[in-house]
Image (cartoon, rainbow, N blue to C red):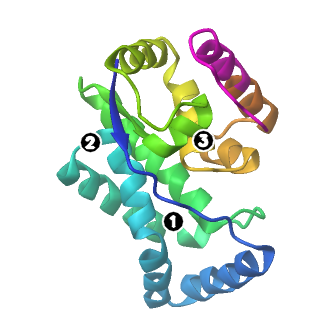
Amino acid sequence: MYRIRLNRLKTSRHMTEEEIAAERLLIEASKKDVRKFSALYDRYFEGIFEFIYRRTDDEALSDDLCSQTFFKALENLKRYEFRGLPFSAWLYRIATNEVNKHFNKTNRNRVFSLEEERVKELMDAEDEGFTQAQLDLLKKTLSELPTATVEILELRFFEQRSFSEIAYILNIGESGAKMRLYRAVEKLRSHFNISWRE
């Protein structure tokens, strides 16, 4: 069961190849001198915290899971292998695992937070917002989807991650990520006017 929260859109941008290359040098420097990891921490803390918060709706818990994410990243930094993706993909993978471990240990409901602007974009909605009936139907539809499918919806539409990043974050094949997303979009299309371009 998911609880639905509508949030204001937080924009994200994709890294260029040059930025990824520069980041890779910073990672290698951090492997030799852990103090340099603070630049990576500063760059990604807010995004990882928000990602976790959108899944928990609990600030204190999000803070704990975010701290655990960065602790594990620092602890395992020497084993990090560059795969052509931004370093954030590795952090999102760790954060996803930490959130999933938390929910596997507790009986709390998962949260699926929706940025209102992205939902409008996805569903070709009018500017006046959503009716309670539409939100209830969206909540019911999402609750019928497997957790892994909801994660893909979130990563693709609300985090704006590429399929290669999604595959890496969720430790699945890229074609599997596309198939899960396709099935989720088809399920949503049975109830909503969905516009989706790969």
Residue 39 locus on image (x, y percent): 48, 84
**Closer mark to the observer between disc 3 and disc 2:** 3
Q: Quadrant of the C terminus?
A: top right
* Between 142 and 190, the one nearer to me in the picture: 190
For label 2, the crowd category at 10 Å Cα-Cα, with few meaning under 14, some 14 to 19 and many 20 or more, is some
Among numbered discs 3 and 1, the one appearing first in the sequence:
1
Secondary structure beneath dot 2 equals loop
Among numbered discs 2 and 1, the one appearing first in the sequence:
2
Secondary structure beneath dot 1 equals loop
Q: Is residue 53 magenta?
A: no
Magenta segment range? 182-198
Q: Which residue is mark 1?
A: 76
Secondary structure beneath dot 3 equals helix
Residue 44 locus on image (x, y percent): 47, 70
Q: Taking 23 as reference, is 98 above or below it?
A: above
- The quadrant in which residue 5 appears is top left
Q: Which residue is mark 3?
A: 157
**Along the horizontal axis of the image, is 120 left or right of 176?**
left
Give the residue at x 44% y 41%. Answer: 116
**Closer mark to the observer between disc 3 and disc 1:** 3
For label 1, the crowd category at 10 Å Cα-Cα, with few meaning under 14, some 14 to 19 and many 20 or more, is few
Give the residue at x 69% y 65%. Answer: 81
The CA distance from mark 2 to mark 1 is 28 Å
Q: Quadrant of the N terminus?
A: top left
Residue 57's disc number: 2
**Amino acid type assigned to the residue bearing label 1 in the image:** Asn
**Along the horizontal axis of the image, is 157 left or right of 72?**
right
